[in-house]
Amino acid sequence: MYDLKALYEAESVSHAIRLLEEHPDAKVIAGGSDILIKIREGKLKEPELVSIYGLDELRGVMLEEDGTLRIGSLTSFSHVTKNPLIQRHMHVLGEAVDKVGGPQIRNIGTIGGNTCNGVTSADSASTLFAYDALVELAGPDGVRVVPIQDFYLKAGCVDLRHGEIETAVLIPKASYEGYAGHYIKYAMRNAMDIATLGCSVNVKLSEDKECLEDVRIAFGVAGPVPLRCPAAERAAKGKKAEDETYRQFAAEVLKDIRPRESWRASKAFREHISQVLARRAMEEAVNRAGGEKR
């Protein structure tokens, strides 16, 4: 069914790195929900594959000593959604990845594969951008940590160097503590579809729940890579959590997004729904943070 040149099974992270160095044309396979489709469609001809699927040390979610949430790159979408730490500290990420494909895909697909694909429509991407996530990479030269905004280089391309594999996604405590968020996926169908636009907003409210102490917003499919909207964030930060702030916030997203024409949606339509989603996501995030709907 799948015409492979070779399949190598990594026994550890260091072994995976060594295999990638020994076989420079090899591709990494984890859950396989994307790469196997490419092989079946003929987009990869007789590839060499390095499987990291058996590396259980890359699975699971843990809280590090400094409060950083560490999500192993082989953690499936289903396990991200159900994990108690994610539910307690970053519930919106669980909701976002629960919109990926169907149950079979969510059981096999991984957070690492979703980020390493570099596609702007990845359901995890906009929420990870909004939470200033970091990507941990291990390679021949050791371990390096890259802000997710720098990890995405261009459409379908990430800062993954020769011999490297992604080992974890990290969310610093300062990025999630006290925040509440909401992710909205707009698609042509309610399920089993790629996002026409994805919008993730998280907020931190003042102690009296009246003001927006901090705001972050990120979009998927609003440009060649997922992106933040600093103009919208500046427009809302420090303002009252009220209708006028939400209106200004939504209008400002047009200064930063770069949607394109495609068969899924026109540029004009994406610009329109970006404002609608921004406002709705903001209102729900405020509500989840303990503020009142206005």
Image (cartoon, helix red, strand yellow):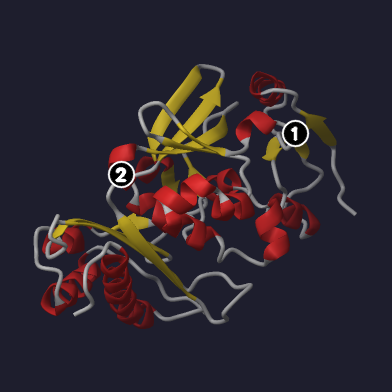
Dot 2 falls on a residue whose secondary structure is helix
- Closer to us: 42 or 220: 220
Residue 153: horizontal and vertical position, in percent?
Answer: 42, 45
Evaluate if marks 1 and 2 touch, with contact meaning CB atoms under 8 Å apart: no
Q: Secondary structure at mark 1?
A: loop
Residue drawn 50% across the image and 17% down it: 142
Compared across the picture, whether 41 is left or right of 206 comes to right
Q: Is residue 257 above or below residue 118?
A: below
Q: Can the viewer see residue 123 in this picture?
A: no
As drawn, the label of residue 175 is: 2
State the residue position of label 1.
Answer: 54
Closer to viewer: mark 1 or mark 2? 2
Which x, y percent locates residue 157? 50, 46
Task: Name the residue type under label 2.
Answer: Ser
Residue in view at x 76 percent, y 37 percent? 49
Residue 37: image x %, image y %? 74, 57
Q: Quadrant of the N terminus?
A: bottom right
Q: Toward which corner of the image does residue 18 lie, by quadrant?
A: top right
In the image: residue 101, left or right of residue 250: right
Closest to the observer: 95 or 234?
A: 95
Looking at the image, which residue is at 31% across and 76% down? 280
Q: Residue 44 location in percent, x, y?
A: 74, 49
